[in-house]
Amino acid sequence: MATAADADAMRRAIELAARGLGSTSPNPVVGCVITDASGAVVGEGFHRRAGGPHAEVHALADAGERARGGTAYVTLEPCNHTGRTGPCAQALIEAGVSRVVYAVGDPNPQATGGADTLRAAGVQVEQGLLTEEAEAGNAAWLTSVRLGRPYVLWKYAATLDGRIAAQDGTSRWISSAESRADVHRLRAEADAVVVGSGTARTDDPHLAVRGIEDAVQPLRVVVDTEAKAVRPGARVLDDAAPTLIAVAEDADTGHLADVDVVRLPRTATGLDIPALLAELHGRGVRSVLLEGGPTLAGAFVAAGAVDKVVGYLAPVLLGAGPAALTGAHITTLTDALRLELTETVRVGADLRITATPVSATAVTSTAKER
């Protein structure tokens, strides 16, 4: 039976894991807290970067000999394989830890089995403490393993009447400076930022992270079906971050000779979204921040490829102009994509609303039960 002290230690491990967001891909974010035999915290650590020591190794180094006879609280089942680093289950055994409590079982077949290894060595192992919270913090990696595609967060900014621009096309700035800064946090936590040809043509966006120290720049992706929106000199083609232009298989890309271009199948409305996500997944992308306009967002929604929605609602009314979402193949209320609100926060003058599609929640739960 988990105690309040157990829950506090695991909650701290989840907080530590979040520090790795944006820098560990394609690996998960993981946090670890170690207490000594008396229950005092003696070591903390988190996975900082792909290829570097795992959370347990950092925490064990912090604890030293004080880990012997103690308890390790880990957000993800300790790994059982040797990759670029050694198996964490063995490291915990060698350190003399007597009890391991972890929140989420490792769904990666290459790394699972750590719990069995620990038990075989006589370590007391417990699973399932604060599982829901730990899964939420590691949603991108878990989605990539369970569904074989990147986790997609769709972000948009709109007025209270749902407009993302005025009737004449002006849109700078609907949201507050604080909201725009918050978007850079989302970019810093993502492996890739995706926009469509309309946004590229109208806004000439830069898409790199600004104002966040030591941020790992995400891959900038422009979905430019006809290869006409991104022209030489576009801001997205500078060297601030890597860039990928996704075009149709028959598009003329002569003007993009020095640019990373991927050709994808067409659909009736643009490019094949599952094919795009498969390409990104193959490149190690585990999380996508979708910043595209209403058409691209609609294509992702229609493809069932939106896992979270973050909307910045500004206290502004326009009465006309483009809506935040179009072309999602929703024609009647019964087909509406229902969302579960998970957070509402005031950001500057705006309200940031975070919600998860009910269908995505069901998929995650089903996968978790399996």
Image (cartoon, grey):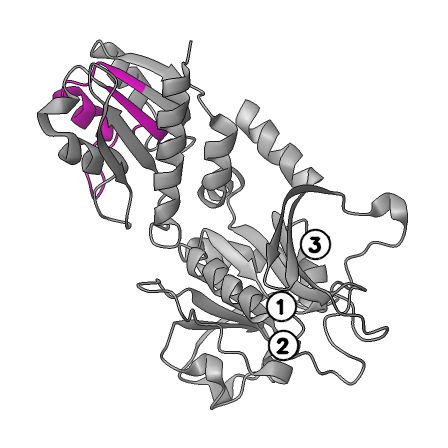
Q: Residue furthest left?
A: 65
The residue under the point 37% across, 51% down is 25
Q: CA distance from mark 3 to mark 2?
A: 18 Å
Residues in magenta?
Answer: 71-100
Foreground: 193 or 282?
A: 193
Residue 124 shown in magenta:
no
Q: Which label sits on residue 101? A: none
x and y percent of residue 107 in the render?
43, 31
Question: Mark 3: which secondary structure?
Answer: helix
x and y percent of residue 220 in the render?
47, 70
10 Å crowding of disc 3: few (<14), some (14-19), many (20+): many
Q: Which residue is mark 2?
A: 199
The residue under the point 48% across, 53% down is 287
Left of 147 or right of it: where is 108? left
Foreground: 79 or 264?
A: 79
Q: Amino acid at mark 1?
A: Gly
x and y percent of residue 197 in the render?
62, 77
Question: Mark 2: which secondary structure?
Answer: helix
For marks 1 and 2 on the same chain, the one whose residue lies earlier in the sequence: 2
Q: Amino acid at mark 3?
A: Val
Left of 222 or right of it: where is 33? left
Q: Which residue is mark 1?
A: 292
The residue under the point 50% across, 86% down is 234
Q: Amino acid at mark 2?
A: Thr
Question: Residue 250 sits in which quadrant?
Answer: bottom right
Residue 38 visible to an observer of this rendering: yes
